[in-house]
């Protein structure tokens, strides 16, 4: 049986990428074949090495347009025969060029209950708010900033006694637990529909 080939795009430390790679090792019908970063020193590349997953840094030259860089990303993923793309803290908005290459096959996790707090510093904005709940959102990726059809949201009740670090730690634990489960559901559904 041919395994579904997953790629992870990440820019930072990669705690979600780590949880996905460890989860994938126990799956019989899918595998993480590469981790790709736009940051040369991203810790996620070391995490990939520790998990025996191939990793690659794709450099952004100033001469490249957004579309040209995204095409370079697509060609890198194509070299790994990737079926499905997972964003895990990838700090770039993907262009139509990329999304047309992987139609309805790119998902992202965002650390807020979208449409609240899209973009950067979502935990900080949520912590500074008077919200009683916070959490994370997993969604298909479109060209906008954290837009796209929502697949799943999970909420946490706010504890006003929590420091920001405690608040964020609980949020990250939820992300790390939920994301692999939803990835499995989405890719298996797509495969069932003949889209993978």
Image (spheres, helix red, strand yellow):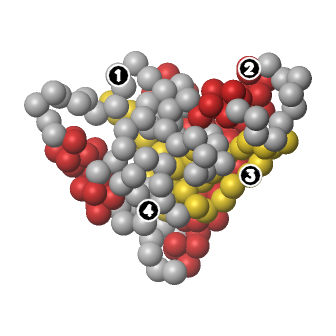
Q: Which label number is shown at residue 40?
A: 1
Q: CA distance from mark 4 to mark 1?
A: 25 Å
Circle 2 packing at 10 Å, graded few (<14), some (14-19), many (20+), is few
- What kind of element bears circle 3? strand
Circle 3 packing at 10 Å, graded few (<14), some (14-19), many (20+), is some
Q: Which label number is shown at residue 165?
A: 2
On the image, the x and y values in percent for residue 71 come to 21, 49
Circle 1 packing at 10 Å, graded few (<14), some (14-19), many (20+), is some
On the image, the x and y values in percent for residue 168 come to 71, 28
Residue under pointer 4 = 105
Q: How many marks?
A: 4
| Nearest-to-viewer mark from 3 and 4 | 3
On the image, the x and y values in percent for residue 147 come to 47, 55
On the image, the x and y values in percent for residue 150 come to 58, 61
- What kind of element bears circle 2? helix
Q: Nearer the viewer, residue 132 or 63?
A: 132
Residue at left offset 62%, top offset 31%: 125
| Nearest-to-viewer mark from 1 and 2 | 2
Residue under pointer 3 = 154
Residue at left offset 81%, top offset 41%: 132
Q: CA distance from mark 3 to mark 1?
A: 32 Å
Q: Earlier in the sequence, mark 3 or mark 4?
A: 4
Q: Earlier in the sequence, mark 3 or mark 1?
A: 1
Where is residue 17, by image quadrant?
Answer: top right
- Cβ atoms under marks 4 and 1 closer than 8 Å: no
- Image height of 1 relative to 80, above or below: below
- Cβ atoms under marks 1 and 2 closer than 8 Å: no
Q: Earlier in the sequence, mark 1 or mark 2?
A: 1
Q: Earlier in the sequence, mark 3 or mark 2?
A: 3
Where is residue 135, by image quadrant?
Answer: top right
């Amino acid at each position: 049986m041919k395994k579904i080939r997953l790629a992870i795009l990440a820019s930072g430390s990669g705690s979600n990428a780590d949880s996905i790679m460890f989860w994938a090792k126990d799956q019989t019908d899918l595998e993480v074949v590469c981790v790709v970063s736009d940051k040369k020193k991203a810790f996620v590349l070391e995490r990939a090495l520790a998990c025996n997953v191939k990793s690659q840094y794709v450099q952004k030259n100033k001469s490249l347009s957004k579309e040209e860089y995204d095409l370079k990303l697509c060609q890198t993923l194509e070299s790994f025969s990737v079926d499905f793309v997972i964003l895990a803290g990838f700090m770039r908005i993907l262009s139509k060029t990329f999304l047309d290459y992987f139609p309805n096959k790119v998902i992202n996790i965002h650390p807020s209950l979208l449409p609240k707090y899209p973009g950067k510093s979502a935990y900080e904005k949520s912590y500074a708010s008077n919200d009683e709940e916070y959490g994370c959102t997993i969604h298909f990726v479109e060209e906008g900033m954290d837009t796209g059809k929502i697949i799943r949201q999970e909420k946490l009740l706010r504890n006003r006694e929590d420091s920001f670090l405690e608040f964020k730690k609980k949020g990250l634990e939820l992300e790390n637990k939920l994301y692999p489960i939803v990835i499995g559901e989405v890719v298996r559904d797509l495969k069932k529909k003949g889209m993978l």
